Image (cartoon, helix red, strand yellow):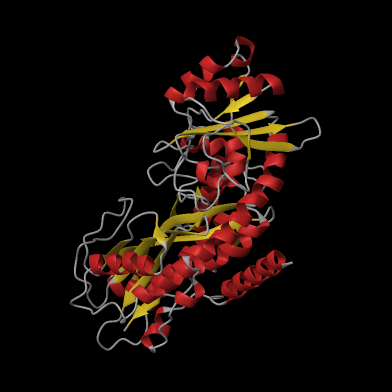
Amino acid sequence: MLKSFILNVSLLQLFILCLSLSQPSSASDFEQGKVIDYSPSILSQRDRVEPANRIILDRLNNLLPKVMAETDIDLWLVINREYEEDPLFYSLVPHTTFAARRTTMLVFSKDEQGNVERFTVSRYPITGFYETRWEGGSLDEQWKRLGEIIAEIDPKKIAINTSEHWPLADGLTHGLYRLLYDALDEKYRERLVSAEPLVIRWMETRTAAELDIYPHVVNIARSVIAEAFSSKVITPGATTTDDVAWYIRERFESLQLRPWFQPYVNVQRKGDKIDKDSPFFGASGVVIKPGDVLHTDVGICYLKMCTDTQEMGYVLRLGESEVPQGLVKALAVGNQWQDKFTDEFKTGRTGNEILAKTKKAMKRAKILASTYTHPIGFVGHAIGPTIGMWDNQGNTPVRGDWKLFPNTAYAIEGNIKTQVKEWDNQWVQIKLEQTAVFNGKKVIYLAGRQTEWHVVR
């Protein structure tokens, strides 16, 4: 009863916390003194364990049997060595796991009824997650035991994490592969297959429990951008783009949130010499001045879910009280690109097909756009259909040929280029990125999207 009470309190606490930042703040909130203290809204390291583990166990109990059946895999091996863990290892083990201990062997066996039994053949137990099937001994004995277990199960297919094209599905090292090969009887060596489709479906699928939490995580990232793009942080004529980037990084660190890449901030300004054909506009490492257009790229991971966000800001000139209409229209064109792009998300379409249809839609709308959207989830640049690349607006072999599935998440990423009247028709680039989920029918932004400029007064 006590355990049930604690669990229910934890769930209630998490629900309240997820509601506490229901909408990202705007830069104007900070200009008006509405500075937000995020600390009460973010779980301590200790309190993150229960919801993170609950999500992982839910996936193991309910999602894994489905994707193993869908991909027709009888036995899946995830074998790791300390300091050389499989990239997906941390999606399968408790939140407090920092490394594989010595050689950690995770085994997933599907029976004829579709039930999946999971266990470990390892020196150290993974309590509460995996049954232990080895009493200990030498490394040679460990491999021998794994071979014996596989012979007892007698699977038709033994899936291992090897892949030519998908890094997240290529986690089995060559050394471990050789040891596994030597541990198997000849007939089982012939049954080794790539776990590639299983890994993709496991990593790309977002569960209901994850989607309960995900909006809160994205909202935190967006709110920190709003804080950074305000006079709380920026003093025009003194603050540099690097100052703002490091403010974002250190703000996340102070909240015990892990960025998965260094935040990036750049500016565009009237009078810049612009090459319209350049893939990206903007300069970094400079002092921010009145009249500058700001851009940042930010990503964090919290409770196993990662975000990727790009937003735009404007620094008012002396005498200005609002963003120039030409820039307002430019952002609206960026939103138009988002709408036309996400309208092309249809279950079963490949990433290459979505990109091709988006390009046709942009041509009809006379919008100069570039699309380079990627899946997101346990890692920032995740696994699933690639929809364009910044340096390749044509087909992406293999990864662009993967089909779109429901309940998958994406960083809706790209840019538009347009001319701004107030800048003597100079070209300006609006670079946008928001984390979203495709539910099988439509794309939903997990914490809204930017439709108004962040304004530094």
- Quadrant where the C terminus sits is bottom left
Q: Position of residue 416 (x, y in %)?
A: 42, 59
Q: Is residue 349 left or right of residue 395?
A: right
Q: Is residue 70 visible?
A: no
Looking at this view, name the residue that lies furthest to the top: 186
Residue 240 visible in rendering:
yes
Q: Is residue 373 above or below residue 424?
A: above
Residue 173 vs 210, above or below: the answer is above
Coordinates of residue 267 in the picture (x, y in percent)? 27, 66
Instruction: Pick whichever, 142 or 192, lies toward us.
Output: 142
Residue at 24% across, 78% down: 290
In this rendering, the answer to whether 171 lies above or below 30 is above
Q: Quadrant of residue 5?
A: bottom right
In-image side of 69 versus 39 (left or right):
right
Q: Is residue 356 above or below residue 398?
A: below
Where does residue 57 sit, x and y in percent of width and height?
64, 50
* Residue 294 percent across, percent down from the top left: 32, 69
Identify the residue shown where x is 46% and y is 78%: 25
Q: Foreground: 60 or 9?
A: 9
Looking at the rendered structure, the number of numbered marks drawn on it comes to 0
- Residue at (50% x, 29% y) in the render: 163
Front residue of 196/55: it is 55
In front here: 41 or 300? 41
Q: Residue at x 22, y 75 (%)?
A: 289
Task: Check the picture and name the quadrant holding the N terminus.
Answer: bottom right
Residue 9 in which image quadrant: bottom right
